[in-house]
Image: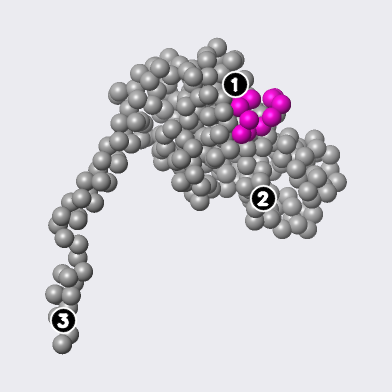
Amino acid sequence: MNMPKSRDIQAKMPSPKVIFIAFWLVTVKVLNSYKGLLYMLENIKAVLFDLDGTLVDSMWMWKDIDIEYLGRYEYELPSELQKEIEGMSLSETAVYFKERFAIPESLEEIKSTWMDMARDKYTHEVPLKPGAREFLVWLRQQGIRTGIASSNGIELVETVLKAQGIREYLESVHTCCEVPKGKPAPDIYLMVAETLGVKPEECLVFEDVPMGILAGKNAGMRVCAVEDTFSANQREEKKKLADYYIESYDEIPRERMQP
């Protein structure tokens, strides 16, 4: 004999007790996460940011540029390429491209071509991450130092910062092209901290990819991972590596944070 549909649905529904326990576990998880964010800036004197994928939504742009650039030499974009160049400086990436794809241009010509391709996109198509501008303004109001530690070239970094009107809120701006090793080595974060006159343990880093997170951790700094569509498949790895995780800068509770 077939069970009536209404009774069948009731039989498959979880009991009120199961629903309550599930709700309680989710609530505890959310509260613990919020509590961690409340004290994220405790004893922090400087906040250091990666740029692409962290302060600005631009990682999609670089994949498009790689596809177009390699297409000029009749290469298709290898599926693993983005992962292999993750964390490299612009100079290191140029070396990688030249050696792997036998690019006839010089290293300086490769970088110059990329910058020409990226400049217009940075100026007209790349937006700030949600809440980033307000967070930068708040940090200045609290007297917390700020800096950029990017794997990009300095010209493009300055281009996007000025286009977004946030250059004035960033005191120290440097790139991995200025240090011996790119991310995950700690070199760039240690350099920016030194220019700001703060100790590594007094810094909080915001990063969007595992190699960048490791660079901050290797420098002895606390790290907050930032959600980005480009690295969505690495979300769990990012959460394990970082001390904190946000999907938007709007999530950071300002009322309890201490400079």
Badge 2 amino acid: Leu
Q: How many marks?
A: 3
Residue 80 visible here = yes
Q: Nearer the viewer, residue 144 or 239?
A: 239
Q: Circle 3 sits in a helix, a strand or a loop, which is it? A: loop
Q: Quadrant of the N terminus?
A: bottom left
- Between discs 1 and 2, the one toward the N terminus: 2
Secondary structure found at label 1 = helix
Prevailing secondary structure class for the magenta stretch in the rendered image:
loop
Distance of mark 3 from mark 1, alpha carbons?
Answer: 68 Å
Image mark for residue 190: 1
For the residues marked 1 and 2, what is the alpha-carbon distance in whole angstroms?
28 Å
* Residue indicated by mark 3: 3
Per the image, the residue denoted by label 2 is: 81
Q: Are marks 1 and 2 in contact (CB under 8 Å)?
A: no
Point 30% across, 41% down: residue:
29
Whether 186 is among the magenta residues is yes
Q: Residues within 10 Å of mark 2 (few under 14, many from 20)?
A: few
Which label sits in the foreground, 3 or 1? 3
- What's the residue at 46%, 46% (across, down)? 236
* Residue found at the far right of this picture: 104
Q: Secondary structure at mark 2?
A: helix
In the rendered structure, which segment of residues is drawn in magenta?
178-189
Label 3 and label 2: CA atoms lie apart by 55 Å
- Are there few (<14), some (14-19), or many (20+) residues within 10 Å of tag 3? few
Structural crowding at the residue carrying mark 1, measured as other residues with C-alpha within 10 Å and reported as few (<14), some (14–19) or many (≥20): many
Q: Mark 3 or 2 closer to N-term?
A: 3
| Residue 68 falls inside the magenta stretch | no
Identified by mark 3, the residue type is Met
Residue furthest bottom as drawn: 1
Residue 212, given in percent of the width and then of the height, sits at 57, 35
